[in-house]
Amino acid sequence: MGNLTTTEMPSGETDIVPESMVVALIAAASEVRARAYVPYSHFAVGAALLAGDGQIYIGCNVENASYGLTICAERNAVARAVAAGQRIFTAVAVVTENGVTPCGACRQVLAEFNPQLLVVVADTAGNQQRYRLSELLPAAFGPKHLIETQA
Ligand SMILES: [Zn+2]
């Protein structure tokens, strides 16, 4: 596949995210990370989510004095994308200082839309790792489990 990254879509189709798009996603995530509101943890996160039509939706983490109300960058990006009418996602890039993977809550929210999502995590030094969401959240609970009970 050369420079292309292949992900399997929920339908079983194969979706290809061009390397140039991965680069663009990391750049967008890195840019929005600078706007993270993190007065308590000082752990800034930027996320960029790629929709099926090629649009990119960004999100940063937003903390709150009531700590439990903090929203992660990834879920922020998902909410923005869904509010814009998107339901199909093919990749997400997450940029942090040390290149960590999304938290459990974000894995679950991302899996709602594409359990095979390409997840690219990058650090501020430019190192990156790639996963499929199914690797990060194996045997996930999802929409199909509810639908199966409605017969
Ligand atoms: Zn999270």
Image: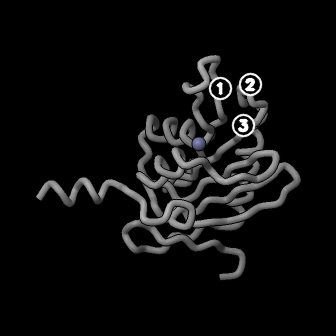
Pair 1/2: label in front: 2
**Residue 58: quarter of image:** top right
* CB-based contact (under 8 Å), mark 3 and mark 1: no
State the separation of the CA atoms marked 1 and 2: 7 Å
Q: Is 133 located above or below residue 99 in the figure?
A: below
User: Which of pointers 3 and 1 indicates the residue nearer the eye?
Assistant: 1
Q: Residues within 10 Å of mark 3 (few under 14, many from 20)?
A: many
**Residue that mark 2 sits on:** 40
Q: Earlier in the sequence, mark 3 or mark 2?
A: 3
The residue shown at (72%, 31%) is: 36
Which residue is situated farthest in the left direction here?
151
Q: Name the residue under label 3.
A: 32
Q: Give SS at disc 3.
A: helix
> What whole-number distance in Å separates the C-alpha atoms at marks 3 and 1?
15 Å
Q: Which residue is painted at 66% across and 35% down in the image?
A: 60
Residue 131 picture location, percent across and down: 62, 66
Q: Which residue lies furthest to the right in this view?
A: 125
Q: Could you tell me how far apart the alpha carbons at marks 3 and 2 are, in whole angstroms?
A: 18 Å
Q: Nearer the viewer, residue 131 or 80?
A: 131
**Vertical placement of residue 19 versus 72, above or below:** below
Q: What's under tag 2, amino acid-wise?
A: Tyr
Which quadrant is the N terminus positioned in? bottom right
Q: Which amino acid does label 1 sit on?
A: Glu
Residue at 76 percent of width and 55 percent of height: 122
Callout 1 touching callout 2 (CB < 8 Å): yes
In the picture, measured across the screen, residue 21 lies left or right of residue 141, that is right
The tag on residue 63 is: 1
